[in-house]
Image (tube, rainbow, N blue to C red):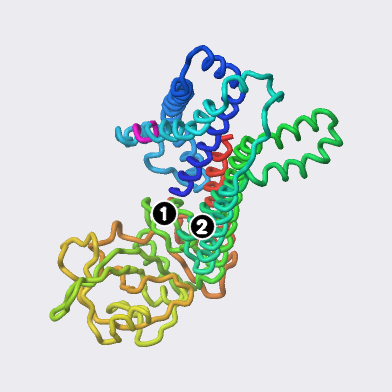
Amino acid sequence: MLWFVLVALLIGGFLVANAFSIMVAQRTSELALLRCLGATTGQVRNAVLLEALVVGVAASLLGTLAGPLVAAALTQQLSRLGGGAAPGAGLGALLGGLSPVALGAPVVVGVLVTVASALLPARKATAVPPLVAMREEGSGMAVERVGRLRVVAGVAVTVLGGAVLALGLARCAGALVGEGGLLFLVGVAVLAVPIARPLARLIGAPVARLAGMPGRLGRANATRSPRRTAATASALMIGLAMIVTMTVVAASQKATAGAEVRTLGAPYQLATGDQPAGTDPFGTPDGPVVSRALLDVLASRPGVSGVTGRWGLAATLATPPGWKGAAPAVSVDAVYDPASYQRIAGLRLEEGTMDGRGFAVSDRFADGLGVAPGSRLWVEVAGAAAPGTPIVLPVTGVFSDPQRRASPVVVALDRVAAALPADGVPVAYVAVDGGQGPAAAAALASATSAYPAVTVRDGAGQRRFQEQQVNGSCTCCTRCSGWRW
């Protein structure tokens, strides 16, 4: 979301600079007349900046007032797509949660971006001598030239951005991908001025022949002022790039979610309708959970070969006697039925067992700390009823995680019940003998009939649900981008 905000500010800056450039070009004679009548260059420049300040204040106030209305409408839309009501999604709840800083920051940022974007047009307003500027447009206006420094800087930034982007893709590092993409866009925007004139000539050639005089005038206007043409094209380019990026990310999330559903060892999912979109099939929402009582009922049903679900907990390795150094942080999966979790999540048991009597740890974790089955771990879970009191259990098994689904430490729900937000799991997965089919679906529907908040989804239903949420998020971002045009 931070990258989205930065790109939106960058697009807004381009649009403001382009608007004031056009305004200054249209009022060149008027500004020159003021200078002939005695106005100084500073007064002319300040007049343009004052207009930018007024526009920035008015637009920022309107945007801040309209923002909660738009946020409430989008939140309700995404809630309907997700199949549940989002808590605190109403307009009153949004307004009640806004602090003075949250209301004032958009106004300040909007005004600063507007005024900063108008600095270059304001400077250009005083760069042309008054007598030259008062001539009829086109009689003495020289064609703009582009300096070599801009070309060199644009090429350097573009190459650097492309290299960082490629490195991020190779390492699967999202931060590097975002930084490289932003640098690449900035580099292309800088190069837009040098390439605007040749591209306008090339693209405008058939238009000039087919459209006659209007086409020739448009081509001449685009080639005469490459900076203005580049400013307009760059803003459109960045907006289009953001929309394409969102589309690619959405397609990637859909493909990943589909692969997760196919590789899970359980064909049925039980959720309360509030599971968030994402590639983690064991996601942890803030809403209701699938209760422990229902999990016990399902586990006892004939034909059910496994039931599981998990909570992801933050923890630290407490300092046992003789420990030297700081206590390292670790993620812990508190799961229902660790043996079923091992089969459904696709974990490979390398040593020992996952029977819930103690901790099961990943092979990387075991190698890093030098632990093995029979060792004891001191784990302090955040949110425990007695802070500072570690859970001391033996290590009963070591597993490998080819799908990278599990946390380094896995423990049964009963062992950390005091640290759980609720008595149950956010999302449950059920494996049945013979795989999914009408009989299995009917049996699960019967078992969950006393729990109306719980939804049963087969593999196709899981994919459709996650695709709906991804589509909703992508539509939200695309519409936000479209509103800027």
Q: Is residue 105 magenta?
A: yes
Q: Is 475 one of the magenta-colored residues?
A: no
**Which label sits in the foreground, 1 or 2?**
2
Say which mark, if any, is on residue 51: none
Q: Is residue 243 among the parts visible in the rendering? A: no
Q: Locate residue 260, reporting x and y percent.
A: 53, 67
Give the total of numbered labels: 2
Which residue lies at the image location 58% right of the left edge and 40% below the top edge?
Answer: 235
Amino acid type at circle 2 is: Gly
Q: Which span of residues is magenta-colored? A: 103-107
Question: Is 2 located above or below residue 67 in the figure?
Answer: below
Magenta stretch, main secondary structure class: helix
Give whichever of 235, 483 is nearer the camera: 235
* Image point (51%, 12%), residue name: 37
Q: Is residue 114 above or below residue 182?
A: above
Task: Identify residue type, mark 1.
Answer: Tyr
Residue 194, image x, y percentages:
64, 45
Residue 437, x across and y down, in percent: 59, 67
Report whether 97 appears left or right of 317.
Answer: right
- In which quarter of the view is residue 392 placed? bottom left
The residue that mark 2 highlights is: 180
Question: In the image, is 140 to the left or to the right of 432?
Answer: right
**Marked residue nearer the N-terminal end (1 or 2):** 2
* Residue 303 visible in the displayed image: yes
Quadrant containing the C terminus is top right
Helix, strand or loop at disc 1?
loop
Q: Residue at x 30, y 32 (%)?
A: 100
Query: To which quarter of the image does residue 424 belong?
Result: bottom left
Secondary structure type for disc 2: helix
> Mark 1 highlights which residue?
451
